[in-house]
Image: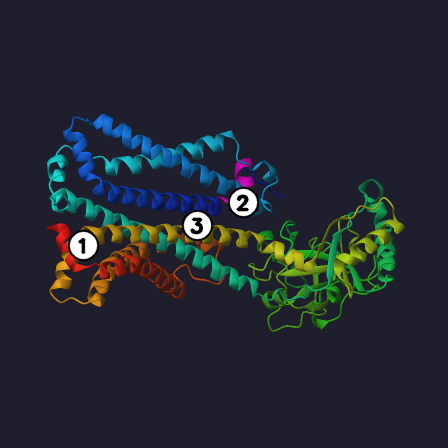
Amino acid sequence: MTFNAVPIREEITQGWRVRLLLLLGVAACMLLIVCANVANLTLARGMRREHEMAVRAALGAGRRRLLRQLLTEGMILAVLGAGLGLAMAAWSHDLLVDFMARRSARVSEIRIDTAVLLFTLGLAILTGLVFAIVPALPGRRDVASAMKEDGNRTGAGLGRRRLRSALVVVQVAFSFTLLVGAGLALRSLSRLEKVDPGFTTENVLTMTVDLDWARYRGQQNQEARIAAYDRLLERVREAPGISSAAIATTIPLNQTANPFSGQFEIEARSAADREARPRADIHLASPAFFATIGLPLSAGRAFTDGDTLESTQVAIINRSLATHQFAGEEPVGRRISFDQGQTWNTIVGVVADARVRGLDQPPADEIYLPVRQTSPLSASLLVRTSLEPHAAAGQIRDLIYSVDPRQPVAQVKTLDEVRALSLANPRSTTALLALIAVLAVIVTAAGLGGVLAVTVSQRAREIAVRMALGARRGDVVALVLRQGMTLVLLGLALGAAGAFGLGKVMASFLFEVAPTDPLTFAGVAIVLVGVATLACLLPARRAASIDPMNALRAGA
């Protein structure tokens, strides 16, 4: 026997580190999108207020005085935004708890405590102030040009417009990356929900019925344990509406219970090297187990009441093990041993493959041993009923107590609920990714529309001249749309690289979906282009509605 020492931090976060770091990175991307949007809108607002700021500067207001004014305005907006964000975080608290519930025993400690509150509030206010103030603060060389009527056409004005366009491209790129991640997760979840587990989950109730260790432990109590399970099954089967009942040490798809895996050897095929011996998941089951969960036999027979401690030791294997170890041979009748040939179990049947470990895990090699020959202390009761499963739960519990009032009954669930719980983690991850991606698209669409709206107002005179020279409204709409969609296409090209990187990070928990799935990339691009087009239409229609005469008079 061997063992490994593992730090407790690694054990707690095993299998979740990548997923949690991914969500942290996604949240950081969302923060960058919002920061770019705030900076963009602030630049647009600052360009409209250039004349005001220049007048203030000309009248003697120094940079500190202007900074204090902008700081006050930015602080109010940052605090309001941070407060709204905290309210949304409190509202979505249950989603996070559900996301972590199956992987952490300390999930009840997840809350918005003082440390989290101060960190998030400080981060929100800091980023809000920095990206709201710095872009709007005029430089000394901007004052003279801003006092001029066409100050926006100077080098500084053109530079700011280019910066705003670059920020839109960055927003689109990050939004495309997040949407691709959400799309991959959605397609993976859709594939996972359609997986056939290999057995039927309808109308099957499960519960743990671990025997009292103080009364039944030890080799001398083997027959007492078998008798306890026999009495329990006999009483449950007598209940109305119960078609079958079984005892087993595994509940299919119950990922909280790691299957016991052991090595074995096949008669006349013993391996000299112990590490070279085959390995399989070992389950203990009563005769009616396969019928109760609807797992069909492919060959041979199921367990019977005659498979006892005194009879020949038997075993049933699944189709996966038969294919891997007995390819081209008949496995029924062959013998296997778990103790280097001291005792042998005869294979009496082969059952179909089932995804016992999880829907996202391929069928493993499995060996089933009869409960009457192994007498486990810990086991589960599985009951198939024609009634509503939870309606029969109370009746079954009372029957168990009638056999032994001290017998504990816990974790009462239907197999449908067990299947749903096995999908809880990918569903929660997908929901979080989709929520953040949708928010990113909304913010990006708002930023794009805002940039074009300011551009239209600044180019009103140019558009009026075009229309006075014969340009039609459709030409004006196309002009604005072309400007907006150019930024979108540049963002898509830049975001494709980020999406490829995100796909590689997500590859470890995608199911039957390639990280570079072309359908997802194409679908996300179409959705983003559609949303961007809608965001561009409002400023485009506004540009088309400009009255050339009024615009030229206003600019004269």
Q: Which residue position is annotated with label 2?
A: 96
**Do the residues bearing badges 1 and 3 touch, measured as CB atoms within 8 Å?**
no
Under mark 3, the amino acid is Ile
The answer to whether residue 147 is visible is yes
Under mark 1, the amino acid is Ala
* Residue displayed at 17% across by 30% down: 57
Quarter of the figure that contains the N terminus? top right
Residue placed most toward the observer, 274 or 510: 510
Mark 3: secondary structure: helix
Under mark 2, the amino acid is Leu
Residue 542 in which image quadrant: bottom left
Near mark 1 (Cα within 10 A), the count class, few <14, some 14-19 or many ≥20, is: many
- Upstream in sequence: badge 2 or badge 3: 2
Distance, label 2 to label 3, CA atoms, is: 13 Å
Image check: 114 left or right of 454? right
From the image, state whether disc 1 or disc 3 is nearer to you.
Answer: 1
Q: Which residue position is annotated with label 3?
A: 436
| Residue 161 point in image, percent of width and height | 20, 47
Image check: 430 left or right of 123? right
Q: Residue furthest right?
A: 402
From the image, state whether disc 1 or disc 2 is nearer to you.
Answer: 1
Distance, label 1 to label 3, CA atoms, is: 36 Å
Residue range of the region highlighted in magenta in the rendering: 8-17
Residue placed most toward the observer, 205 or 435: 435
Q: Which residue position is annotated with label 1?
A: 460
* Residue displayed at 52% across by 47% down: 15
| Residue 383 point in image, percent of width and height | 77, 60
**Do the residues bearing badges 1 and 2 touch, measured as CB atoms within 8 Å?**
no
